[in-house]
Image: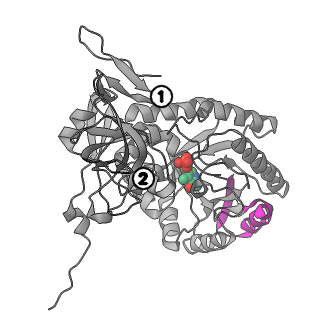
Amino acid sequence: MTFSSTSTQANPTSLTTLPGHPFVAYRDAVLHVEDVALSALASQYGTPLFVYSKAAMLSALAAYQRGFAGRNAQICYAMKANSTLGVLQVFVKAGCGFDIVSGGELERVIAAGADARKVIFSGVGKTRSEMRQALSAGIGCFNVESEAELDVLSAVATAMGLIAPVSIRVNPNVDPKTHPYISTGLKDNKFGVAHEDALRVYRHAATLKGLQVVGIDCHIGSQILELTPYLDAMDRVLDLVASIEAAGIPIAHIDFGGGLGINYHNDAPPEADALWLQLLTKIDARGYGDKKLMIEPGRSLVGNAGVCVTEVLYLKPGAQKNFCIIDAAMNDLPRPAMYQAFHSIVPVNTPGQDGASTTYDVVGPVCESGDWIGRDRALSVVAGDYVAVLSAGAYCMSMSSNYNTRGRAAEVLVDGMAMHLIRARETAQDQMRQEHLINGD
Ligand SMILES: *Cc1c(COP(=O)(O)O)cnc(C)c1O
């Protein structure tokens, strides 16, 4: 689906959409997010600049909502994908719950207006103080990842005179066929409780005074592009639901995690509604269709809603390689350096007919050879041009750093023709605020 042109010109606007990026398109040779030209945003706010489409987020969410129509289901946005307040607000207003992985994320999402009862807390290393914070806030569920964590959580809750609602993250031991760093459901991952230990751990949880078992959860990995791992994992989880309930421990909800991939580079992930049609058929066939269902999508809700606009600083021809040096770097866009990930890089203004292209390695200014954003890219650009790094809505700003004392980029949320600055560019003063010179000589 593409947005409709709102142009009032006599000549219809020429429109070229980018596959997989329904709200990003060239209009009259200038790249737009919804109705806003990226060249205009870049000159107004500077670069590097993250630009997000609100409509793209809501349309990605709508695919899940269609999938769960008529069901007792809760969509919990995994906010580590992009935790900027203005982004969270979009999902709060749309009625989402949230999956958090730290006390900091809890504070953020409450600041964005979320209802703590719709928040679930995942992660292998929750501290006692994070547990107390989440219990005081009244969060909906702790997704517990080890037996030791169960004991600590029960003790913390008991000391506060509270009962912690828990679900245990089980590890279905299926291969999601994704990058090893974002695969989480195999036996040798640090996440979750092994399938064969799950029943024993549930029995133990049921004996702990400070806990109430409410659900079961799993999350097998990220950027998953195939249906089979999901279907296999669901079978394994439903097998456990049967044996846990047979042991007299009721399971009120099944939380199937996140992980659905997006199109970065000719990728063809299943649509969220098509995926859930298949999963729900399986759940119904096994007689669990009345249970509350929860999911924790992150990347698939925001990844292709965002682009990063950056300026070409220098072109540097070389004997082996030509370099295109841009003003965004690995501190802004860490995925290539971390996972050899691919992001499309496209010009903001499409070149004319005669614009012959050159093959470049697109790199940032950071003092590391790992600071590359794209390799062997054919581009027709000159210094001063803007280029857009696509699929930059997930795991970019939320993973960004201040390495090389680079201020974090600004962020703009576009909504039709309206634009909202949701994060101002970080200054060196901002970065130094918590630091102290040593007093004395
Ligand atoms: C990261 C994470 C998610 C979200 O994963 P995506 O691939 O972004 O959908 C969901 N649940 C848990 C427990 C996670 O750690």
Compare residues 39 and 140 and report the one nearer the observer: 39
Q: Of the numbered discs in the image, which one, if any, rests on residue 435? A: none
Q: Residue at x 76, y 53 (%)?
A: 250
Q: Is residue 140 visible?
A: no
N-terminal of the pair, mark 2 or mark 1, is 1
Compare residues 143 and 349 and report the one nearer the observer: 349
Amino acid type indicated by mark 2: Val
Question: 199 above or below 117?
Answer: below
Which SS class for mark 1? loop
Q: Position of residue 182 (x, y in %)?
A: 58, 54
Amino acid type indicated by mark 1: Pro
Whether residue 214 is in magenta: the answer is yes
Please report the bounds of the magenta region as a residue range: 194-219
Which SS class for mark 2? helix
Image quadrant assignment for residue 260: top right
C-alpha separation, residue under disc 2 versus residue under disc 1: 32 Å
Q: Nearer the viewer, mark 2 or mark 1?
A: 1
Compare residues 331 and 149 and report the one nearer the observer: 331
Image quadrant assignment for residue 438: bottom left
Compare residues 179 and 207 and report the one nearer the observer: 179
Q: Residue at x 38, y 22 (%)?
A: 16
Q: Which residue is mark 1?
A: 19
Image quadrant assignment for residue 49: top left
Q: Which residue is mark 2?
A: 109
Question: 441 above or below 199?
Answer: below
Q: Is residue 23 left or right of residue 268?
A: left
